[in-house]
Image: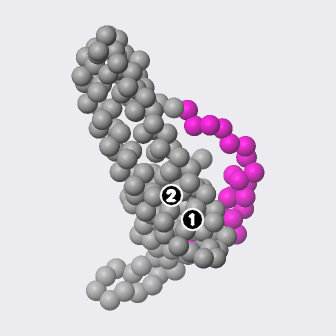
């Protein structure tokens, strides 16, 4: 999947500025797709050249004109083409797993520090996602777009919880070996 397909999916809901797309990434897409504001703007430029998006300039007082992007028919066709393709699991490339593999040969103390640090990172992300989940649950009759956005958030919640559980498991094993 390319960043462009994620942007097309976000813009399919409603026309947005590049800044608003970036905010949408932070608020609801970040649990499964990361992109900086600069990457998003660069990709929008490429997508415009491909005819997948167009923009309308909206004048602003004291600021440069705002560009509001919307998906074109060609962009919808590209999203539909990509959507029809089968997906494959994303290969894992995780430094922490290599460190765990190397633990018998190096300092356990360094691994313990890293596991606690990573557990904290995942705990903070989980807490942020739980706050988002509370907002979704507060909507009595969410529109279909929100229901599917919520499902992607649920995957992010499970992902972060799985990391926390795994860190705890490894911490238990390393601590038990230290007692032997």
The foreground one among 154 and 2 is: 154
Q: Position of residue 122 (x, y in %)?
A: 39, 44
Count neighbours of disc 1 (C-alpha within 10 A) and say few if under 14, some if 14 to 19, many if 20 or more. many
Q: Position of residue 84 (x, y in %)?
A: 75, 51
- Residue 171, magenta (yes or no): no
**Exactly how many numbered labels are in the figure?**
2
Q: Position of residue 146 (x, y in %)?
A: 60, 68
Count neighbours of disc 2 (C-alpha within 10 A) and say few if under 14, some if 14 to 19, many if 20 or more. many
Residue 40 visible (yes or no): no
The foreground one among 10 and 116 is: 116
Q: Is residue 176 above or below residue 45?
A: above
Q: Is residue 129 above or below residue 163?
A: below
Which residue is located at x 42 percent, y 51 percent? 126
Contact check, label 2 and label 1, Cβ < 8 Å: yes
Mark nearer the viewer, 2 or 1: 2
Q: Is residue 101 above or below residue 125?
A: above
Cα separation, mark 2 vs mark 1, equals 9 Å
Q: Earlier in the sequence, mark 2 or mark 1?
A: 1
Left or right relative to 142: residue 119 = left
Which residue is located at x 34 percent, y 38 percent? 118
Report which quarter residue 128 is drawn in.
Answer: bottom left
On the image, numbered disc 1 is attached to which residue?
A: 10
- Residue 83, magenta (yes or no): yes
- Dot label at residue 116: none
Q: Secondary structure at mark 1?
A: helix
Left or right relative to 154: residue 57 = left
Q: Position of residue 134 (x, y in %)?
A: 48, 66
Which residue is located at x 42 percent, y 39 percent? 164
Q: Secondary structure at mark 2?
A: helix
On the image, numbered disc 2 is attached to which residue?
A: 29
């Amino acid at each position: 999947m390319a960043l462009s397909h994620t942007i097309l999916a976000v813009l399919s809901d409603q026309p947005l500025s590049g800044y608003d797309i970036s905010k949408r990434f932070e608020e609801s897409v970040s649990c499964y797709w990361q992109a900086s504001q600069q990457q998003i703007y660069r990709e929008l430029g490429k997508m415009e050249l491909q005819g997948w998006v167009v923009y309308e300039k909206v004048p602003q007082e004291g600021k440069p004109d705002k560009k509001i992007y919307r998906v074109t028919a060609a962009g919808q066709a590209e999203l539909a083409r990509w959507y029809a393709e089968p997906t494959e699991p994303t290969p894992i490339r995780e430094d922490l797993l290599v460190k765990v593999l190397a633990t018998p040969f190096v300092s356990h103390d360094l691994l313990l520090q890293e596991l606690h640090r990573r557990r904290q990172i995942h705990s903070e992300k989980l807490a942020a996602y739980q706050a988002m989940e509370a907002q979704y649950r507060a909507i009595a009759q969410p529109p279909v777009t929100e229901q599917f956005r919520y499902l992607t958030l649920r995957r992010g919640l499970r992902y972060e919880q799985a990391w926390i559980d795994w860190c705890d498991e490894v911490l238990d094993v390393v601590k038990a070996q230290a007692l032997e």
